[in-house]
Image (cartoon, helix red, strand yellow):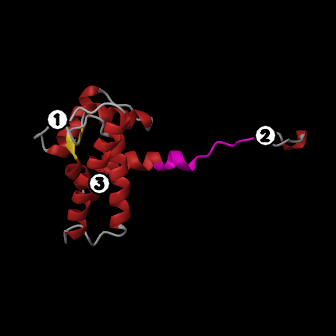
Amino acid sequence: MNFQGGKMYGLSKQKQDEELETVNKGFLDDPKYNTDEDLEAKLSAFKAKFMQFELNDRGDLDIMGLKRMLEKLGAAKTHLELKKMITEVTGGMSDSISYTNFIKLMLGKRSAIAKIILMYEEKAKETQVPTGTPQKKAIKDLP
């Protein structure tokens, strides 16, 4: 799939959304995972995150997508570190992370890397920069 332009891009992302939603339903029906607390909400958040960084139109998160994700979170990694992360997730079977592997990573025991990524992102959202004019302080308030 090599779509270009606004409408075709939108159609491509809509198709991807439907495919990922089918994978999510599989996890919701799987007894190994369906006992997780708030599974549906987690899967929805994981899908959004995956779609944000999967930009190669192949349905997987390649090394550049992973690089962008980590850079956005202020945790840039070298090429070798990124390859090691992908190898860890895929067991050396691929050079990119499929959505199914991404979900297994996030929900499984080996999810430390991905959970750290999302944790940093959530913390970044929590830190709000003050807006407007600063409050006036008296000299007595200075340290």
Q: Which mark is residue 106?
A: 3
Question: Which SS class for mark 2?
Answer: loop
Specify start and end residues of the magenta stretch as a single range. 122-133
Q: Which residue is mark 1?
A: 95
Count of numbered labels shown in the rendering: 3
- Rounded to the nearest angstrom, the CA distance separating label 3 from label 2 is 41 Å
Q: What is the three-letter code of the residue carrying label 3?
A: Met
Residue 61 lies left or right of residue 72; in this view the side is left
Q: Earlier in the sequence, mark 1 or mark 2?
A: 1
- What numbered label is drawn on residue 7? none
Residue 134 is labelled as 2
Picture coordinates of residue 95, whole percent (x, y): 16, 35
Which quadrant holds the N terminus? top left
Distance (Cα) linking label 3 and label 1? 18 Å
> Neighbour class for label 2 at 10 Å: few (<14), some, many (≥20)?
few
Q: Horizontal and vertical percent for residue 44?
A: 36, 58
Q: Residue at x 61, y 46 (%)?
A: 128
* Quadrant in which the C terminus appears: top right
Where disc 3 sits, the SS reads: helix
Q: In this orientation, which residue lies closer to the viewer: 50 or 123?
A: 50
Which amino acid, by three-letter code, is at mark 2? Answer: Pro
Q: Residue at x 25, y 67 (%)?
A: 28
